[in-house]
Amino acid sequence: MKVLVVDDDLALSDVIAFTLRRAGFEVLNAYDGQSGYERWLADSPDIMVLDIKLPVIDGLTLCKQIRAQSSTPIIILSVQGADEDVVHGLDVGADDYLAKPFSPAQLVARIRAVLRRAGMTPVSDSLTASDLTLDLSRREVKHASQRDPTPLTGLEARLLEVLMLNKGQVLPIETLISHVWGVDGGDRVMLKQLVHRLRQKIDRDFASTNASASYIENVPGVGYALVQRSARNSE
């Protein structure tokens, strides 16, 4: 599926594009409202990710312009995160509104959710990293050596999703909390407990041979990362 990202922040656009491609999407880029509109006409993307403060044509105007012609799903990105800003963005036709700063993995999850609501099947509801395959629709994880998958809770699946999307990268604690519970929905103690429960599920088949190894690495004072299974110490 094609995602058109319209944002004049080149660095952020590159990060978004990298994350979306890793999640299996084809990414198109535009850096001002006029070129975004022209790209939308020419390439017929399945969904748009649209900044508000754009050169030439601003994002809200572009959103209204496209919505008058099409039902293409649109997610607005903006540093303006007040309630009235979100309401206005949804009123002009956006399907979702994500305030900056945000985690790229959270954007992936929002895109998948918007596509499902629009009756469009995302590229894949499965992610693979470090010998693990996560089926998001079934909330199941399976190691390459396993015959049967292991069921996960919704929170466990969201945590594993963001870790797999950013494999090898240490994600800050606050980023993980925001992705799993939303803003102000969780805390460090809850995250630590969730990590412990997820570790028990994805590491347990190997506990007898290497009890100290874990797929989820803790970097004290920073956060957590999904790593290739090895003799790494967990908490």
Image (cartoon, grey):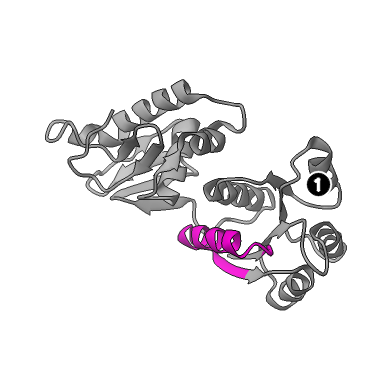
Locate the C terminus and report the quarter of the image it occupies.
top left
How many numbered dots are placed on residues in this image? 1
Magenta span includes 17: yes
Q: Amino acid at mark 1?
A: Leu
User: Which quadrant would residue 140 be assigned to in this image?
Assistant: top left
Q: Tag 1's secondary structure? A: helix
Give 3 or 81, whichever is nearer the viewer. Answer: 81
Instruction: Estimate the x, y position of residue 27 in percent, counting from the top left.
Output: 57, 67
**Residue occupying the point 76% across, 45% down:** 80
The residue pinned by badge 1 equals 90
Classify residue 145 as left or right of residue 106: left
Give 161 or 53, whichever is nearer the viewer. Answer: 53
**Residue occupying the point 17% across, 40% down:** 231
**Mark 1 Cα shell of 10 Å, populated few (<14), some (14-19), many (≥20):** some
**Residue occupying the point 17% across, 31% down:** 211
Locate the N terminus and report the quarter of the image it occupies.
bottom right
**Residue occupying the point 61% across, 27% down:** 184
Outermost residue on the bottom side: it is 42
Can you say whether 129 is above or below 151 in the image? below
Instruction: Estimate the x, y position of residue 233 in percent, counting from the top left.
Output: 22, 34
Give 51 or 219, whichever is nearer the viewer. Answer: 219
Q: Specify the segment rendered in magenta.
A: 6-28
Instruction: Estimate the x, y position of residue 137 in percent, counting from the top left.
Output: 50, 44
Can you say whether 181 is above or below 96 in the image? above
Instruction: Estimate the x, y position of residue 88 in percent, counting from the top left.
Output: 85, 45
Can you say whether 183 is above or below 17 in the image? above
Outermost residue on the front side: it is 221
Classify residue 179 as left or right of residue 87: left
Classify residue 68 as left or right of residue 198: right
